[in-house]
Image (cartoon, helix red, strand yellow):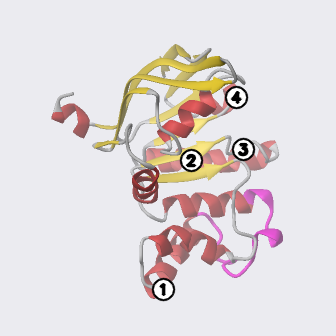
């Protein structure tokens, strides 16, 4: 691929396949997926159970590798990396926002936000300052010492968003970010993601809800391991 093309995109995948051996049967979860994601683009991925959505997200999030094909993440060829290399890429390049928040129950708001910075070797002083800034940005500056059990679901998701931003990632994955929230709280979380997108963040939103997907400016719909549609809005 031309170098200038790589520089203009945070994600490039070409003819990506993923096969799983299930007993005597080979399951073709992805059957040749290709697309690019430009820097600053806000995209959603939709698909029912069995569509290949989770498999694709595991590969895009550097949690798994494809059986074949090419994947360039922010200029790095990651398709053939080993587990240690993928882990390093995740720490530096990706911020994750999960449906179940994935916060550490024994840690405070400030400490949960600081986790990615700890693994990058930040000093405690700098880490606290950065985490406090992010907590204030998501409206939790007054809850720094509270633990997840003392927060509402919406507040937990705000902590997760702040944590995802801590390492200034090249790409943010939001996997069903409103799935465990009531509709009003879900709208508040989507407003935060929309604001991040307006600031030029690269975001991939994974959801099965059309109204949530429509917050993005581009919607990819998967069916049976293939892209059924790629809609730009």
User: Residue drawn 46% across and 51% down?
Assistant: 83
Could you say which is closer to the camera, residue 165 or residue 212? 165
Q: Residue reaching furthest top? A: 228
Q: Earlier in the sequence, mark 3 or mark 4?
A: 3
Q: Is residue 73 left or right of residue 108?
A: left
Q: Pick out the residue farthest to the bottom.
A: 125
Asked if labels 3 and 2 touch by Cβ distance under 8 angstroms, the answer is no
Q: Which residue is mark 3?
A: 178
Image disc number at residue 124: 1
Residue 136 shown in magenta: no
Identify the secondary structure beneath mark 2: helix
Whole-Å distance between the Cαs marked 1 and 2?
28 Å
Which mark is first along the chain, 1 or 4?
A: 1
Residue 177 against residue 36 in the figure, above or below: below
Q: Nearer the viewer, mark 1 or mark 3?
A: 1
Q: CA distance from mark 3 to mark 4?
A: 11 Å
Q: Quick check: 61 above or below 29? A: below
Residue 33: x %, y % from top left? 46, 20
- What is the magenta segment's predominant secondary structure? loop
Q: Nearer the viewer, residue 223 or 160?
A: 223
Q: Crowding near pointer 4: few (<14 within 10 Å), some, many (20+)?
A: some
Front label number (2 vs 3)? 3
Find disc 2 in the rendering and name its residue: 193
Mark 2 / mark 3, whichever is N-terminal: 3
Disc marking residue 208:
4
Secondary element at tag 3: loop
Query: Which-is-in-front pick, marks 2 and 4?
Result: 4
The residue drawn where x is 78% and y is 57% is 153
Instruction: Say whether residue 46 is visible.
Output: no
């Amino acid at each position: 691929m031309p170098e200038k093309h790589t520089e203009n995109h945070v994600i490039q995948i070409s003819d990506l396949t993923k096969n799983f051996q299930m007993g005597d049967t080979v399951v073709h979860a992805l059957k040749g997926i290709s697309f690019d994601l430009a820097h600053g683009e806000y995209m959603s991925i939709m698909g029912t159970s069995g569509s290949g959505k989770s498999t694709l997200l595991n590969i895009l999030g550097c949690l798994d590798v494809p059986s074949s094909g090419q994947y360039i993440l922010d200029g790095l060829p990651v398709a053939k990396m080993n587990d240690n290399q993928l882990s390093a890429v995740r720490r530096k390049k990706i911020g994750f926002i999960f449906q179940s928040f994935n916060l550490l129950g024994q840690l405070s708001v400030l400490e949960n936000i600081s986790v990615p910075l700890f693994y990058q070797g930040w000093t405690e002083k700098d880490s606290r300052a950065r985490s406090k800034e992010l907590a204030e940005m998501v409206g939790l500056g007054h809850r720094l010492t509270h633990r997840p059990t003392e927060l509402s679901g919406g507040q937990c998701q705000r902590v997760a968003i702040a944590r995802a931003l801590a390492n200034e990632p090249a790409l943010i994955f939001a996997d069903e970010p409103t799935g465990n929230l009531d509709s009003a709280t879900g709208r508040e979380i989507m407003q935060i993601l929309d604001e991040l997108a307006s600031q030029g963040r690269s975001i991939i939103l994974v959801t099965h809800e059309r109204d949530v997907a429509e917050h993005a400016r581009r919607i990819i719909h998967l069916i049976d391991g293939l892209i059924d549609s790629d809609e730009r809005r």
